[in-house]
Image (tube, rainbow, N blue to C red):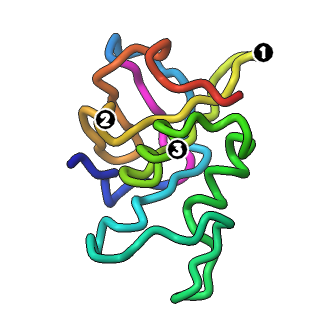
Amino acid sequence: MDTLPRDIHIGMTVYDSAHHAIGKVEDFKFSENEDNPDVQPADIDGTDRKNGRESILTAIAEAFGAEEIPEPLRDRLLREGYIRLDTKGLLAKDRFILPSQIASSVGDEIMLNVDKDQLVKRP
């Protein structure tokens, strides 16, 4: 399974597969189970009862709007984690990058292996 780069940070410039700057990292969430695959997902309300912390499900619900998250996509985001991209342009919608869409991460730059149009748009 692909995972987010460990050196990721807010403000990194993101380039699509055609080497065009498409925005900056606004936020990101690692997979809840990345460090410990035996950890169970949080309860459906978003609370991780065992650790008493907000879960990735809550963050995703806030980022997307809970009723607008298609279940297969929500499950994938929970499993893999994501980067929220602040895209350029006045009317541009933010997008979400999955770990499998990242080709490389070096310094303050992330290179994708897909075009901007292949990223999930924020509703």
Residue 94 sits in quarter: top right
Please tell me which residue is depicted at 32% across the width and 60% down the height of the picture: 6
In front: mark 2 or mark 3?
3
Dot label at residue 100: none
* Mark with earlier residue (2, 3): 3
Please tell me which residue is depicted at 34% across the width and 51% down the height of the picture: 4
Identify the element where label 3 is drawn. helix
Residue for badge 1: 91
CB atoms of marks 1 and 3 within 8 Å: no
Identify the element where label 1 is drawn. loop
Residue for badge 2: 102
**Kind of residue at disc 1:** Leu
Tell me if residue 68 comes above or below residue 76 in the rendering.
above
Residue for badge 3: 74
Q: Does 8 sit left or right of 73 as displayed?
A: left
Residues at marks 1 and 2, CA–CA distance in whole angstroms: 25 Å
Please tell me which residue is depicted at 33% across the width and 27% down the height of the picture: 112
Identify the element where label 2 is drawn. strand
Tell me if residue 93 comes above or below residue 4 in the rendering.
above
Residue 74: give x, y in percent of width and height: 52, 44
Q: Is residue 13 magenta?
A: yes
* Mark with earlier residue (1, 3): 3
In front: mark 1 or mark 3?
3
Q: Residues within 10 Å of mark 3 (few under 14, many from 20)?
A: some
Q: Is residue 86 magenta?
A: no
Residues at marks 2 and 3, CA–CA distance in whole angstroms: 19 Å
Q: What residue range appears in magenta?
A: 10-16
Residue 3: give x, y in percent of width and height: 28, 51
Q: Residues within 10 Å of mark 1 (few under 14, many from 20)?
A: few
Q: Does 65 sit left or right of 57 as displayed?
A: right
